[in-house]
Image: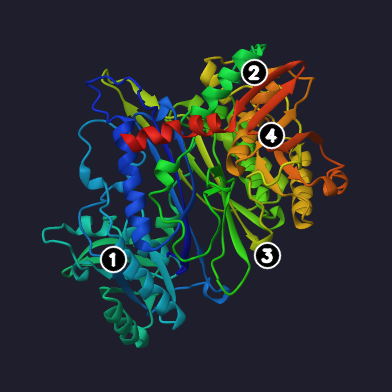
Amino acid sequence: MGLAAKPVMNTDVFCVGEYGQELDANSGMLRPERILPGIMSGVRDYGNRMGIPTVNGAVLFHKGYVGNPLVFCGTAGMIPKNKILKQVSPGDLIVALGGRTGRDGIHGATFSSLALEKGISASVVQIGNAITEKKTADAILRARDKNLYHSVTDCGAGGFSSAVGEMAVDCGAKVQLEKVPLKYEGLLPWEIWLSESQERMVLSVPPEKLGELEDICRIEDVECTVFGEFVETGRLEVFYHGDRICDLDLNFLHDGLPRIHKKALWVEPPQTPSDIEIPPSAAAKIFQQLLAHPNIGSKKWIVKQYDHEVQGGSIVKPFMGVRQQGPSDAAVSRPMLDSWKGIVLSNGINPWFGEQDPYWMAANVIEEALRNLVAVGGSIDHAAILDNFCWGDTHDEEVLGALVRCSQGCYDFASAYGTPFISGKDSLNNTWKDASGKVASIPGTLLISAIGVIDDVRKCVTMDLKKPGNALALVGATQDEMGGSHYNLVTGKSGGSVPRVNAKISLKSMKQMQLAISKGLVRACHDLSEGGLAVALAEMAMGGGLGASAKVSESLPFAAALFSESASRWIVEVEPSKLSQAKKVFSSVPFEVLGKVQKKPFVEISSRGKKVSLKVAEIETLWNSFSDKQVRG
């Protein structure tokens, strides 16, 4: 809404501690089992009431988030091209539109970068009202279409201080704080100025347009108040009942902070070989453990609480297939119902890779977000990405060194793929103190979201298997790369290297996948990520209610062939009559026929005389087990 776009789809990613994790009774920390339902209810209540479909997301369980959980929420919007650029004009009125101002949210921005411990004021948390936000959004859009304001921004971090301070950067502003509508009496001037109460927008309105704006706000039942004026002084002046309480030169405010110099140190951790020589019986057990793991298994207990059908444009939904069991790689929505064009939204996140090497974590999550986008029919040629960094104590030179290395990975691979960063956000110094007073940092976390345009949503591809007898092929090469894998997580192992990304081959593979999908050669497509090939094939079979047989690489240890999380890979389903054409399209990248879709309800994977086999019904039971447990309570 800070650009006056219509919200059309939401995404959310939650990072919390592990369920069942032991906590010190004196730590003051809430259990993840209590925290996550609260997060879910907030997203559900706000998104559903706003009438915005929540179409995409992820949930991660990691011990390192137990004292400082992370909640990422984002929205994609639609806006006419000629409404994007906005510029304040001196003489414009400063107008507050939407909710009233209270103490909730004061110091919310600084709170996000403080160590979590006992004694922090509850006032740092904003209290939202979705109905007020919906009415405010409707008023903003109507006023936009009538050109009733020159510029608009939201009151985020820093409240009015940031909103007005940023809008006035090229001119100046005079603010009368006593005119700001309050939720209750007793707020001090600095509290009004810094409050981060929700549902508030600031507009620069030409005086002659104010009456029309007020009429729209009256119809939409939204409060609209003039509390200042933009002027040509180059200064930010704030008054309260006639007293000047702030007078800052705007050049100083925006450019006066000296550059901070810090020491960053990166020490590459020692590499140990992976221990992955296992018999088939052990492989089957690990396969089952992976399917049931909370990070991999169904998130249906969360997703079903969200309305992903509101606005009527959902095409590729969170779950696909004949029984709505297959987890989609990305979401596709058709925001304009008179057009077949769609928006595709995907993400990539993997803090386990970052614990070994944050550079390759950045490479992998960028590649995964784009790979997911391409898997449903999106085009990397029309894709953009955004980053969300959440990091630990950056006063620690090794923690800062990891952040620098991660940032370098972002630069290198965004450049290699030609995908611009169009937005982003960071939250640093995410730490907490345990009962003994020891400070702990969260695992360095990078969330990459990718967004693109699909010209015709009718050509989208989903991940569920379609027809017995169709061929199954692996696009991309599997390597013995077990570092940071969920195989290591469930077995307690720690060896192996983090997957490397070859940007040149990866980019070529994505372009060839785009071509194959556009030619109608691919019936189903699923990316390989957590749990590797075995989990991906199981999810495809479960989604389609069909079985699958596959013979995987004999040049790798059996566990690596099944569970490696090497980057740049998909499994595709191809009709026999189109297989030779598909081989030609993928001739310049790794492409290996693995087997076929089968009516027999088993997933069977073999290599080097070893074989694992699971019934699709068992796969479904395992995959749903954690979700079903949460539903039952």
- Secondary structure type for disc 4: strand
In front: 257, or 313? 313
From the viewer's perspective, is residue 150 above or below residue 196? below
Q: Amino acid at mark 2?
A: Gly
The Cα–Cα distance between marks 4 and 2, rounded to whole angstroms, is 29 Å
10 Å crowding of disc 2: few (<14), some (14-19), many (20+) = many
Q: Nearer the viewer, mark 4 or mark 2?
A: 4
10 Å crowding of disc 4: few (<14), some (14-19), many (20+) = many
Q: Position of residue 571 (x, y in %)?
A: 71, 39
The Cα–Cα distance between marks 3 and 4, rounded to whole angstroms, is 32 Å
Evaluate if marks 2 and 1 touch, with contact meaning CB atoms under 8 Å apart: no
> Which sits earlier in the primary sequence, circle 2 or circle 1?
1
Q: Amino acid at mark 1?
A: Thr
Question: Is 224 on the left-hand or right-hand side of 424?
Answer: left
Evaluate if marks 3 and 4 touch, with contact meaning CB atoms under 8 Å apart: no
Q: Position of residue 162 (x, y in %)?
A: 36, 58
- Secondary structure type for disc 3: loop
From the viewer's perspective, is residue 352 above or below residue 239? above
From the viewer's perspective, is residue 250 above or below residue 32? below
Identify the residue at horizontal 36%, vertical 65% (top origin). 164
Residue under numbered circle 4: 548
Numbered badge on residue 132: 1
Q: Nearer the viewer, mark 1 or mark 3?
A: 3
